[in-house]
Image: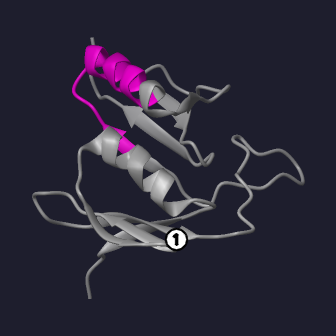
Amino acid sequence: MKLTSTVLDAPEPRALAEFYRELLGWPIGADEPEWVTLRPPEGGPGLSFQLEARYVPPVWPAGPGEQQMQLHLDFEVDGRAALAAAVVKALAAGAQVAGFQPQRDVRVLLDPAGHPFCFWTDDRP
């Protein structure tokens, strides 16, 4: 058994795949109206996006009665300068910075469908 992909629900799978393609530079593999997959060029598990017509974006951090996040993606970057650059790149691609930032060396953003994801660095002074 092996993990082949992490799947995110989306109201527009192709649009969300394009966001992550721009962010990661991974090529699109499967490209169907209800399913799009990105695969890293070096191999390994990819990201897939499936149509969910009734998709409700999570609230992060969630309060009582709000749609909770089911998972999030973490992307490690190399140092604080790379952390800042990754945020700029994500914003240019269509992300938003989350209102709550829990740690100094982590930046929480929301992709265009509202899924939280994080850039982080272990760059200690």
Farthest residue, direction left: 42
Look at label 1 and name its amino acid: Gln
Can you give x and y, in whole percent of width and height, for residue 119 in the image?
40, 34
Outermost top residue: 125
Residue 54 within the segment the image draws in magenta? no
Residue 102 in the figure: left or right of residue 49: right
Quadrant showing the N terminus: bottom left
Q: Is 29 or 82 nearer to us in this picture?
A: 29
Report the coloring of the rendering.
one colour
Farthest residue, direction right: 65
Query: Which residue is located at x 63 percent, y 45 percent?
Result: 114
The quarter holding residue 39 reads: bottom left
* Residue identified by numbered label 1: 50
> Which segment did they paint magenta?
74-90
- Residue name at image x 23 percent, y 56 percent: 27
SS class of the residue under badge 1?
A: strand
Nearer to me, 25 or 72 = 25
Q: Is residue 85 visible?
A: yes
Q: Looking at the image, is 58 positioned above or below residue 48? A: above
Residue 106 visible to the viewer: no
Residue 87 is a magenta residue: yes
Residue 111 falls in image quadrant: top right
Which residue does the image show at 52% across and 33% down from the upper left? Answer: 95
Q: Is residue 61 above or below residue 70?
A: above
Identify the image quadrant of residue 51: bottom right
State the quadrant of the C terminus.
top left
Image coordinates of residue 47 in percent, x first then y, are 36, 62
Counting every numbered tag in the picture gives 1
Which residue is rendered at x = 57% and y = 29% of the image?
96
Q: Position of residue 66 (x, y in %)?
A: 84, 51
Task: Determine the main secondary structure of the stretch shown in magenta.
Answer: helix
